[in-house]
Image: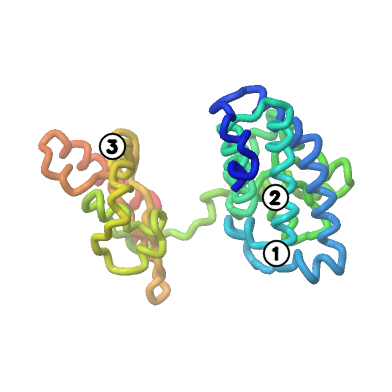
Amino acid sequence: MACLIFPSLNTLPLWNLKGFIASLLLHVTISEPLYYWAHRFFHKPYLFSHYHSLHHSSPVPHPFTAGHATPLEHLVLCTVIGIPITGSILMGYGSTAMIYGHVLVFDFFRCLGHSNAEVVPHEVFNKLPLLGYFIYTPTYHSLHHTEMETNFCLFMPLFDALGSTLNTKSLELHKKITSNSGKNGRVPDFVFLAHVVDIMSAMHTPFALRSFASTPFCMRMFLLPFWPLTFIIMLVMWGWSKTFLFSFYNLRGRLHQTWVVPRFGFQYFLPFATKGINKHIEEAILRADRLGVK
């Protein structure tokens, strides 16, 4: 629609480094403070009860929470994300890569902030303290969902610091969560060690196509376009992957986990691959033993 309304967009170059720099500057100087103040206004009693409460209705934030909002809020977000893109184009620095890149990075950080799973080690902020003012973490934004009068920023806590809404517990909680990561997990009572059957069935995993994985596997035509990508992933797994946790469930109070050896069925028939497969199985057994699996 944009290309039809503004035919000049069809003549944009594929790449222009100046466009990325311009969009970043416009994002920091206009979009960030605009979102910060708009977000604070959405927490006023009337706007919160009529609009923003929908976004806060998720008891536990998750990536989809980032887009769970009313049309009015989506219009504000469109303005916030559109200013750097439009500004760069009007300056004459626009490019196709800048448009798609800006939108994808914007949505990635929005989903990351609502993921409720910490991915950034606290050591990074210990070594680069100023970085904590320029990039938020899932912990930082999760605090906003529990203590709603703090941490209003889009991606940069600098504006919370300037607006006196920075939650002082943010860094300490982030350090606590990342330090304790993996220490409080429950040891499974039993583990089933599996391997991938073939390329097609690999696309039936819950983390690939969740709705499709909820039904018994059967061949579907929509899987064919994904075959080349899955084949490349298979090659990457063959070269670098280790045995990983695939799924888990509780049965009568006992925790079951399925671990997957990163090898496909046909690889078990390759004589030169047996040594590597045996090594993965041995490492899985030793790992289970160290964990205390019964």
Q: Position of residue 258 (x, y in %)?
A: 33, 58
Q: Residue at x 68, y 37 (%)?
A: 85
Q: Position of residue 194 (x, y in %)?
A: 26, 55
| N-terminal label among 3 and 2 | 2
Circle 1 packing at 10 Å, graded few (<14), some (14-19), many (20+), is some
Q: From this view, report whether residue 239 is shown above or below residue 54.
A: above
SS for tag 2? helix
* Residue that label 3 marks: 235
Check disc 1 and give the amino acid type.
Thr
Seen in the image, is 130 located left or right of residue 292?
right
User: Farthest bottom residue?
Assistant: 252
Q: Position of residue 287 (x, y in %)?
A: 35, 47
Numbered badge on residue 70: 1
Task: Return the residue nearer the eye: 164 or 279.
Answer: 164
Q: Position of residue 61 (x, y in %)?
A: 63, 60
Seen in the image, is 223 located left or right of residue 4?
left
Mark 3 or 2: the one toward you: 2
Check disc 3 and give the amino acid type.
Leu
Q: Is residue 202 visible?
A: yes
Image marks 3 and 2: residues in contact by CB distance under 8 Å: no
